[in-house]
Amino acid sequence: MPIKNVEDIESIGGLMPLEAPVNLAEVCLEKSLELENNGAYQKAVEQAQLAMQYADEQQDAETGLHARSRLAWLFSLMGKYEEAQSQADLILEKTQTTPDAVDAFVVKGVCLAETNRIDQAEGFLQRAADISRFIQYKLGLRRALHHLAASVYINRGRFSLALAVME
């Protein structure tokens, strides 16, 4: 039945909602997080790389930064500190005051701490915490303070300060 007027639309039950187009990059990022949570880091990396590819194809710079952020985090978890820092540096070339930037500063701090460069790590983690407060990114603040306490203050024997930071 061809639709000619409003009554015709109402007779078939109204307008059918259009489904939003699927963003394949975001789907891959969600899958990457799920795989990370299940301990499948290499497969999570593959999904994050695929997300970055889809984001590039769609010219979606924001999702591309999210994908790069996932890669940086995953590489740091896998002990691939050079790759992690490289991804973090690419993020920081594009942004300094977003959640992705905060995550990049945290990754850099974690990588530096894991390679016994505690003094350098402290600066990146402190910067991540400061930016997180400014942009009200609570997850980033929690991560920054956690790693500041666990990777910097405890290693220096500053247990009271580590506890204070975590409160």
Image (cartoon, grey):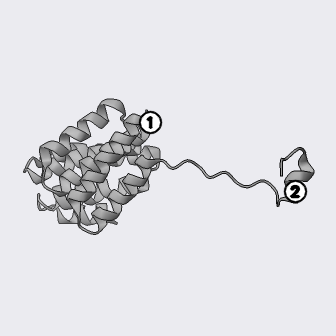
- Is 82 displayed left or right of 161 in the figure? left
- Residue that badge 2 annotates: 10
Q: Residue at x 37, y 34 (%)?
A: 95
Residue 80: image location, x then y, percent:
13, 50
Q: Eyeballing the image, is 103 above or below 13?
A: above
Seen from the viewer's position, the closer of residues 3 and 139 is: 3
Q: Relative to 85, say whether 32 is above or below.
A: below
Can the viewer see residue 102? Answer: no
Residue lying at 85% horizontally and 52% vertically, measured from the top left? 9
- Density class for disc 1 (Cα within 10 Å; few <14, some 14-19, many ≥20) is some
Quadrant where the C terminus lies?
bottom left
Nearer-the-camera pick, 99 or 126? 99
Amino acid carrying mark 1 in the image = Gln
Q: Residues within 10 Å of mark 2 (few under 14, many from 20)?
A: few
Which element carries disc 2, helix, strand or loop? Answer: helix
Label 2 is placed on what type of residue?
Glu
As helix, strand or loop, the secondary structure at mark 1 comes to loop
Mark 1 or mark 2, whichever is nearer to me:
2
Residue 58: assigned label? 1
Q: Could you tell me how many numbered marks the image carries?
A: 2
**Circles 1, 2 touching at the beta carbon (< 8 Å):** no
Q: Position of residue 87 (x, y in %)?
A: 24, 40
